[in-house]
Image (spheres, rainbow, N blue to C red):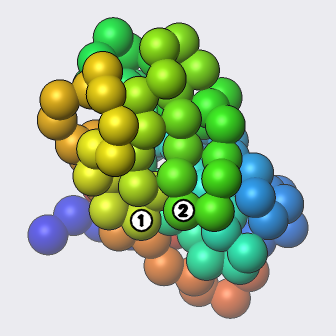
Amino acid sequence: MGEFIKVAGTKDLAPGKAMQVVVNGKEIALFNLNGEFCALANECTHAGGPLCEGFIDAEEVTCPWHGAMFNIRSGEVLGPPAGEAVERYNVRLNGNDVEVEV
């Protein structure tokens, strides 16, 4: 098991938006799905595009570079050209702090 580290406050990220955070040298895309915070590796498994800059639709993020689609909650691939899932991180709220397990 990893350690939970504060990466943001709940008010730092509006619903339906994403931002990049760096934890222990890892670039992580943090998403706010209407108050539920989720975290994925910020690098698309197809060509390394920044998922925090992708188009968000409900529970899906589309890579801004080539259009690969991923489930924000699980990291599962939903559409090509990516062939493998994106790493997913556990997230918890501790008061108004958003913490990611790394």
Identify residue for label 1. Answer: 73
Q: Position of residue 93 (x, y in %)?
A: 57, 82
The residue mark sitting in front, 1 or 2, is 2
Corner quadrant of residue 41: top left
User: What residue type is disc 1 on?
Assistant: Arg
**Residue 66 seen from this side:** yes
Q: Position of residue 96 (x, y in %)?
A: 74, 80
Q: Residues within 10 Å of mark 2 (few under 14, many from 20)?
A: some
Q: Residue at x 61, y 77 (%)?
A: 36
- Which of the numbered marks, if any, corresponds to residue 49? none
Q: Is residue 34 above or below residue 100?
A: below
Residue 34 lies, in percent from the top left, at 73, 75
Q: Secondary structure at mark 2?
A: loop
Residue carrying label 2? 59
Please indicate, yes or no, whether residue 98 appears anywhere in the rendered image. no
Q: Which image quarter is the N terminus in?
A: bottom left
Q: In percent of the image, x 37 and y 15: which residue is there?
A: 48
* Closer to the camera in the image, 96 or 42: 42
In-image side of 48 versus 60 (left or right): left
The type of residue carrying mark 2 is Glu
Placement of the C terminus among the 4 image quadrants: bottom left
Asked whether 5 or 41 is in front, the reply is 41
Q: Give the image quarter of residue 70.
A: top left
- Indicate the position of residue 4 as horizontal and vertical percent values: 39, 68
